[in-house]
Image (cartoon, grey):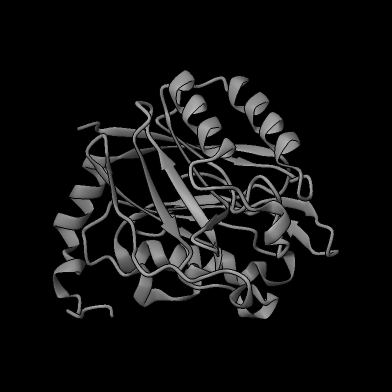
Amino acid sequence: MHEILNITLIQTELEWENPIENKNNFEKIINDLKSASDLIILPEMFTTGFSMNAEKCAEEPNGSTFLWMQKMARENSAAITGSIIVKENDLFYNRLYFVLPDGTFFTYNKRHTFTLAGEDKIYASGKERLVVNYKGWKICPLICYDLRFPVWSRNNEDFDLLIYVANWPQTRIKAWDVLLKARAIENMSYCAGINRIGLDENNIQYSGHSIVWDSMGNECSKPANSPNIIEAALSKTDLKNKRNKFRFLDDRDEFILK
């Protein structure tokens, strides 16, 4: 078990529906990182932006971007995660990959498709939540709109880190700020939110505000509004001490998701 988990969130603009350019940009940023990281976190649909043009943008399962993620994880000795558009069995998914340095990987399909943008009409909804055990840390990665649904995010598996990868617009950024902090507090876990910045082809503005919170709602990093690298060192001992002291999770309600 690693006492300290060093995480890196990469907040940047995304070139619209341009996987090659976006991967080149992320690769340059990752290769230029000054500090070693255990986990690199990229935004939602990091190769395309939040596109509903699934037919054009979708990749096959474990296609070129997945292979790129394996390469980056291996070369940097760090896990890497983020979501892309995938087509499988004639269905489209907003799929997150969590890739370990040895090439092992896990996937999560976005549960709550964003009806306001018509995502539900194009992308199939995921059915199962993912919790990854990595370096002795239990990590639950979710996607954007999932943030609004506390039942789906509920810490009934004693995860240590909750992650949201997102394309969350400027117009509703206050909700992003408040809900990320709330998810950390109510689940007594670290909570990391990575958002993009810039303007997309639908004239939607994104302002970032990527941040990491601890289990008591204290900032582990400062929210960033420009192209930025957000780094945080998470302490397993500090998390355990807070949980043992307050024991809030012992009083949680029991329920089963269906």
> Looking at the picture, how far across and down is residue 9, in whole percent?
54, 41
Is 199 on the left or on the right of 227, as rendered? right
> Looking at the picture, how far across and down is residue 29, in whole percent?
65, 27
In the image, 45 versus 139, the foreground residue is 45
> Looking at the picture, how far across and down is residue 91, in whole percent?
54, 65
Query: Residue at 42% across / 28% down in the picture?
Result: 78
> Looking at the picture, how far across and down is residue 102, in whole percent?
34, 26
Quadrant of the image occupied by residue 129: bottom left
Is 130 on the left or on the right of 34, as rendered? left
On screen, residue 98 above or below 193: above
In the image, 39 versus 176, the foreground residue is 39
Query: Residue at 35% across / 59% down in the picture?
Result: 216
On screen, residue 233 above or below 146: above
Quadrant of the image occupied by residue 39: top left
Is 93 on the left or on the right of 241, as rendered? right
Query: Residue at 49% across / 61% down in the picture?
Result: 89
Is 120 on the left or on the right of 70, as rendered? right
